[in-house]
Image (cartoon, rainbow, N blue to C red):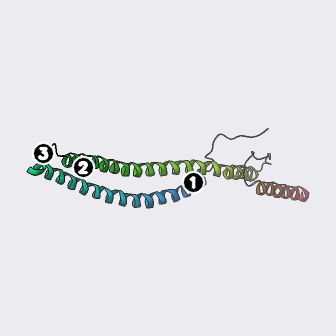
Amino acid sequence: MAIKRKQYLIDRPIQVTISLKIVIIPLLLLVIFSGIVLIFVLTNGNYIAKIVGNQDSLIEMFITTPTLMDSNNEIVVTGEKTFRENLGLLQAIKVNNYTLLYFAIGLTILQAIVLFVYGIYITHKVAGPIYVMRHYCKEIQNGNTPQFRKLRGGDLLVDFYNDFITTINTLQDKDVSKS
């Protein structure tokens, strides 16, 4: 019969410490990546704001210059249409820059959460056998003979666990033979 444990946080200090260490790398990468992206986003935003201002000035010039005020003039119509299109495109670029930044931050936070949960899951496979062996040690300290069992499928430290049981059995056999 396979033993299944439903509580994954068995040794909270060890498991949380290891999981936090697993999460630190993505968080550091987030800070570095976000800093770099933020510099580009802000720089691009400033460029775009300057271009938008220039575009507005050019449109204002077209509108206020008498020779360029002829709304039937094909050059004026094409120029105004192009300027308005450019303004829209520049705003879209600015929105895309911020979307990229928010997406990168969100994805990295999601990655950190997934890695933390995965760290708990992986450390559970180590913490479980340690928990069982600690329980056996307490049983022996209380003068009781522990009832050994197999580890769960997928647990790590199986060789160490088997050596631990062999050592305890050897010590118990030596103690019985001395009596």
What amino acid is labelled 1 in the image? Ser
For numbered disc 1, what is the local secondary structure? helix
Instruction: Identify the residue shown where x is 91% and y is 57%.
Output: 177
What amino acid is labelled 3 in the image? Asp
Front position in the image: 158 or 43: 43
Q: Residue furthest top?
A: 1
Question: Which of the two discs, 1 and 3, sits closer to the camera?
Answer: 3
Crowding near pointer 3: few (<14 within 10 Å), some, many (20+)?
A: some
Disc with the residue nearer the chain's start (3 vs 2): 3
Residue wearing tag 1: 19
What amino acid is labelled 2 in the image? Phe
Q: Residue furthest left?
A: 66
Q: Is residue 159 left or right of residue 58?
A: right
Percent of width and height locating residue 106: 45, 48
Question: Distance of mark 3 from mark 2, alpha carbons?
Answer: 17 Å
Percent of width and height locating residue 116: 55, 50
Quadrant (top left/top right/bottom left/bottom right) for the N terminus: top right
Instruction: Identify the residue shown where x is 86% and y is 58%.
Output: 170
For numbered disc 3, what is the local secondary structure? loop
Residue wearing tag 2: 83
Q: Is residue 160 left or right of residue 70?
A: right
Q: Label for residue 140?
A: none
Question: Distance of mark 2 from mark 1, alpha carbons?
Answer: 53 Å
Q: Label for residue 70?
A: 3
Front position in the image: 90 or 58: 58
